[in-house]
Amino acid sequence: MGPRKKVGFELEFGSDTSFNTLRRKMAKETGITGIKIHEDYSVETRKKFNGEFVTPVWNLGEGMKNLHKMFRWMRKNDIVTDSTTGLHVNVSFANKELTQAI
């Protein structure tokens, strides 16, 4: 078995829906829990609220599955991205030497 990989994501976005409503709706409709939402002043979409979804740390397979669920959910819920938004990927390995090598 290869090194155990862990991953977490930060997805910047804009929405006309409040952060509390988005958090509850995402959990209910996708089954993904533990998502935090923070305001992000570097994001400047045309929407009322600009922020980022911050995921928990997941095993790589679960993280990729949940990321795809989040993208589908975002499209269905008029969550926008533009040139002011980004996707940050945080990766680590159980073997700290591998993490440092990256």
Image: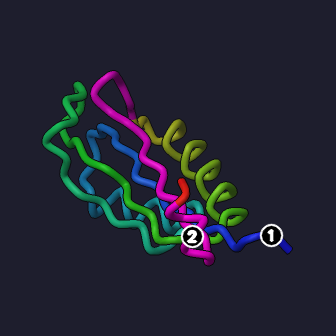
SS at badge 2: helix
Q: What segment carries the magenta color?
A: 80-100
Along the viewing direction, whichever of 8 and 13 lies nearer the viewer? 8
Horizontal side of 92 relative to 61 (left or right) equals left
Give coordinates of residue 5: x percent, y percent.
65, 68
Instruction: Decide if residue 26 is on the left or right side of residue 16.
Output: right
Comes first in the chain, label 1 or label 2: 1
Please rate how many residues cluster around mark 1, counting C-alpha atoms within 10 Å: few if below 14, some from 14 to 19, many from 20. few
Q: Is residue 63 left or right of residue 3?
A: left
Query: Which residue occupies the foreground of this view, 61 or 27?
Result: 61
Q: Nearer the viewer, residue 100 or 86?
A: 100
- What's the residue type where badge 2 is placed? Glu
Q: Quadrant of residue 63?
A: bottom right
Q: Is residue 61 above or below residue 83?
A: below
Q: CA distance from mark 1 to mark 2?
A: 14 Å
Type of the residue with mark 1: Gly
- Image location of residue 77, percent across then percent down: 46, 41
Name the quarter where the N terminus is drawn.
bottom right
At 52% from the left edge and 36% from the top edge, which residue is drawn? 75
Tell me the residue that label 1 is attached to: 2
Find residue 65 and report its horizontal and vertical position in percent: 69, 57
Is 88 inside the magenta-drawn segment? yes
Q: Is residue 82 magenta?
A: yes
**Disc assigned to residue 80:** none
Q: Residue at x 34, y 43 (%)?
A: 12
Residue 7 to residue 33: above or below = above
Q: Secondary structure at mark 1?
A: loop
* Residue 86, picture quadrant: top left
